Amino acid sequence: MKNKIIYVVILLLLVLLLMIGYLGKDTKKFHGRKNTYQLLGYKQFNQLKEDQDIILVDVRSFLEYSTGHIEGAINIPLNSITESDDLTKLFPDKKAIYVFYCHSGNRSKTASELLLRAGYENIFDLGSIQDYPGPIVKDSTKS
């Protein structure tokens, strides 16, 4: 009985260590993942932005974008993406790192899935701008 308890405790500790190791992965290791897009937290986003050249894409409408967007973002509304018959006109480099966001996270998820299906390799979904803790730029010019 005592051996079983020790075995279970060791097994649980190993599982815990594996989980801690997975959660502590550096965002650079996500670069190059294929067939999936990565959901990013804001801390991961800031680290990725510091470590890599990224293309930050706001997929909200131009009106939404002009009321406030994350600094450095370009505006490519989701309807432009879904209606495009050639995504390489909007996103020429299939190996670039694209990070999408929108108002609630639904449109950024859709954009991420569309680019992934089109063969893009480094897709990240930041989700919603609503809880973004960083500075919001308010202007009416497209970046």
Image: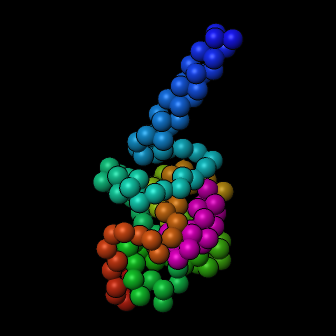
| Residue 109 visible within the image | yes
Q: Position of residue 64 (x, y in %)?
A: 48, 86
Quadrant occupied by the C terminus: bottom left
The prevailing secondary structure element of the residues shown in magenta is: helix
Q: Position of residue 100 (x, y in %)?
A: 50, 66
Q: Position of residue 131 (x, y in %)?
A: 45, 71
| Residue 91 visible within the image | no
> Where 135 falls versus 11 (above or below)?
below
Which residue lies at the image location 40% right of the left edge and 78% below the top edge?
69
> Where 101 falls versus 142 (above or below)?
above
Q: Nearer the viewer, residue 28 or 115?
A: 28
Which residue lies at the image location 60% right of the left edge and 72% below the top edge?
107
Q: Position of residue 52 (x, y in %)?
A: 35, 51
Compared across the picture, whether 22 is left or right of 43 comes to: right
Is 105 one of the magenta-colored residues?
A: yes
Residue extent of the magenta highlight: 101-116
Compared across the picture, whether 120 is left or right of 68 comes to: right
Q: Nearer the viewer, residue 89 or 98?
A: 98
Is 108 one of the magenta-colored residues?
A: yes
> Where 16 falls versus 7 (above or below)?
below
Which residue lies at the image location 43% right of the left edge and 40% below the top edge?
24
Image-quadrant location for residue 9 = top right
